[in-house]
């Protein structure tokens, strides 16, 4: 049990380092990478003792001889420790790496496409049309714009785009903080219902827990009300106009024409929207559709700027844009997903799932708890953990189980997965450090953690609980499953 316990201790310590990255001044990507490696090191060094505990499906796979054929042919007298280490290296790590790589290449492709559009100033075609200075009207416009942009792009990128825009629309710092905070809520709500809008929903979609059409249909309305409830409350509290900053007209040089901006906006958004269509037609993983779209955009930018000066061309082609892509975020996801994969293989997640079932045994309570936790702990490992705790059920297996009605919640497109997408995606808004969108806004505007907790957390909590209630009513009166 020592190695099993030590894995959990190291995971908690690593997570603490990630949560306190600003205090300890160590980037969370570095902590995540170290964490991801260390838990696997502990696992493989004590592999025999951990596996024989029998807490995970890995032990049953090992007993069935999964992946051990080559080892036993080469070394027929290999002892138990050699067999367990070989099983972990050549079976478990390879299997998890495949799943993780799908997510990472999807994110890398999406981030590069969005960054290319932004480098061509394509988003200005949308943001330059905002003229109002009325606080309430501006807040509604930005929130609704953020909600739908987040669904099409992703919540992190949309937050960066809109918060950057705020610096040109609002002069007062505290007012800008408030607007940016409402953008966080809208971005997380918009990303939750879209298969390409949030990392957690991407994970569930790629993992097969949900399908694109169903997650949009079932989670759209709860996500919308997650944004509308706080907006409605704020609308009664906020009055007056915003003071716009005086901008220097010569602050930047334009490298693109209006035609290029329009072209890249339509091609970029079109490439992102094509990903679910690509998966439906080809049945290939979503990351291939994303890479296909990136390849098309890469060729377009090369041809579009081939006659421009080398300096301008370098900034506008994908080769140049890749230098601006947030690679540390990719490394962060690699580290944290690797760590969660180790806990899944060792059996920690199975034990956690049993504990939740024993103490809650209700999908609403379980997901509500996961959502609240996601405001403290990053929603990526929480979602990965839930995916590991609860396997996807088939209708036939659920029907013959001891609790067929309860187990039907865990089939593909079942209520558990829909609620998980909503809760993990929107619960992070309760605290500013609970989501990638919140961390991005915090970094851009230097928003104070305590200020957010006092001014925004209660609004986000109203939206979060309200959205769960809307989902329950939707199930009760429309789909009649409760």
Image (cartoon, grey):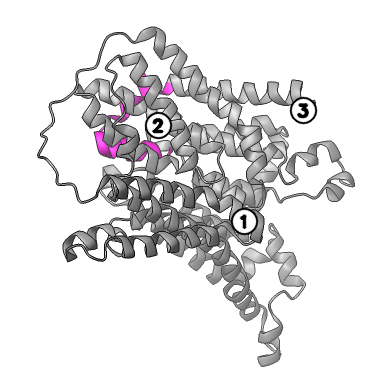
Q: Earlier in the sequence, mark 2 or mark 3?
A: 2
Where is residue 190? Give x, y as percent. 49, 34
Q: Earlier in the sequence, mark 1 or mark 3?
A: 1
- Depth-wise, is mark 1 or mark 3 nearer the camera? 1
User: Helix, strand, or loop for circle 3?
Assistant: helix
Distance from label 2 to label 1 (Cα)? 29 Å
Mark 3 Cα shell of 10 Å, populated few (<14), some (14-19), many (≥20)? few
Q: Please name the residue shown 27% across and 17% down the image.
A: 133
- Depth-wise, is mark 2 or mark 1 nearer the camera? 1
State the image quarter where residue 303 is shown: bottom left
Residue 294 colored in magenta in the image? no
- Left or right relative to 473: residue 146: left
Q: Is residue 108 placed above or below 480 in the rendered structure?
A: below
Q: Which residue is mark 3?
A: 479
- Depth-wise, is mark 2 or mark 3 nearer the camera? 3
Query: Which SS does the magenta portion mostly show?
Result: helix
Where is residue 464? Give x, y as percent. 53, 25
Q: Please name the residue shown 69% across and 48% down the image.
A: 390
Q: Please name the residue shown 69% across and 57% down the image.
A: 55
Residue 366 visible in this rendered orientation of the protein: no
Mark 1 Cα shell of 10 Å, populated few (<14), some (14-19), many (≥20)? some
Where is residue 187? Give x, y as percent. 44, 34
What span is in magenta? 435-457
Residue 456 colored in magenta in the image? yes
Nearer to me, 55 or 257: 257
Q: Which residue is mark 2?
A: 184
- Left or right relative to 167: residue 159: right
Q: Earlier in the sequence, mark 2 or mark 1?
A: 2
Nearer to me, 5 or 270: 270
User: Helix, strand, or loop for circle 1?
Assistant: helix
Q: Which residue is mark 1?
A: 279
């Amino acid at each position: 049990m020592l190695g099993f316990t030590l894995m959990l201790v190291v995971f908690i310590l690593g997570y603490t380092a990630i949560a306190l990255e600003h205090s300890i001044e160590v980037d969370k990507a570095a902590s995540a990478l170290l964490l991801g490696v260390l838990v696997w090191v502990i696992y493989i060094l004590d592999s025999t003792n951990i596996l024989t505990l029998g807490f995970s499906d890995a032990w049953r796979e090992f007993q069935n001889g999964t992946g051990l054929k080559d080892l036993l042919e080469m070394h027929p007298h290999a002892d138990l420790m050699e067999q367990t280490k070989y099983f972990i290296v050549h079976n478990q790590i390879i299997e998890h790496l495949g799943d993780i790589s799908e997510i990472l290449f999807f994110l890398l492709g999406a981030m590069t496409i969005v960054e290319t559009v932004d480098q061509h100033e394509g988003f200005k075609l949308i943001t330059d049309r905002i003229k109002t200075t009325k606080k309430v009207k501006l807040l509604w416009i930005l929130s609704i714009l953020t909600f739908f942009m987040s669904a099409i792009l992703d919540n992190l990128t949309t937050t960066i785009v809109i918060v950057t825009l705020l610096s040109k629309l609002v002069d007062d710092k505290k007012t800008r903080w408030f607007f940016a905070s409402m953008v966080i809520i809208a971005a997380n709500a918009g990303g939750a219902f879209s298969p390409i809008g949030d990392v957690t929903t991407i994970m569930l979609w790629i993992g097969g827990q949900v399908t694109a059409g169903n997650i949009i249909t079932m989670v759209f309305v709860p996500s919308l009300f997650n944004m509308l409830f706080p907006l409605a409350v704020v609308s009664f509290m906020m009055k007056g106009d915003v003071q716009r900053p005086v901008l220097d007209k010569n602050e930047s040089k334009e490298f693109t024409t209006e035609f290029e901006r329009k072209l890249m906006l339509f091609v970029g958004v079109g490439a992102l929207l094509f990903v679910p269509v690509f998966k439906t037609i080809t049945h290939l993983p979503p990351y291939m559709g994303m890479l296909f779209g990136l390849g098309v955009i890469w060729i377009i930018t090369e041809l579009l700027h081939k006659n421009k000066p080398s300096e301008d061309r370098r900034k506008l082609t994908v080769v140049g844009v890749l230098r601006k892509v947030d690679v540390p975020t990719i490394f962060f996801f690699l580290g944290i997903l690797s760590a969660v994969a180790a806990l899944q293989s060792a059996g920690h997640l199975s034990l956690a799932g049993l504990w939740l079932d024993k103490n809650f045994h209700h999908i609403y309570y379980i997901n509500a708890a996961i959502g609240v936790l996601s405001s403290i702990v990053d929603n990526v490992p929480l979602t990965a953990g839930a995916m590991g705790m609860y396997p996807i059920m088939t209708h036939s297996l659920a029907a013959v189980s001891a609790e067929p009605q309860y187990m039907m919640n865990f089939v593909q497109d079942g209520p558990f997965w829909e609620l998980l997408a909503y809760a993990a995606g929107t619960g992070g808004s309760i605290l500013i450090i609970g989501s990638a969108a919140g961390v991005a806004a915090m970094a851009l505007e230097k928003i104070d953690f305590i200020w957010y907790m006092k001014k925004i957390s209660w609004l986000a909590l109203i939206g979060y609980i309200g959205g769960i209630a809307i989902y329950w009513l939707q199930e009760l009166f429309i789909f009649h499953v409760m």
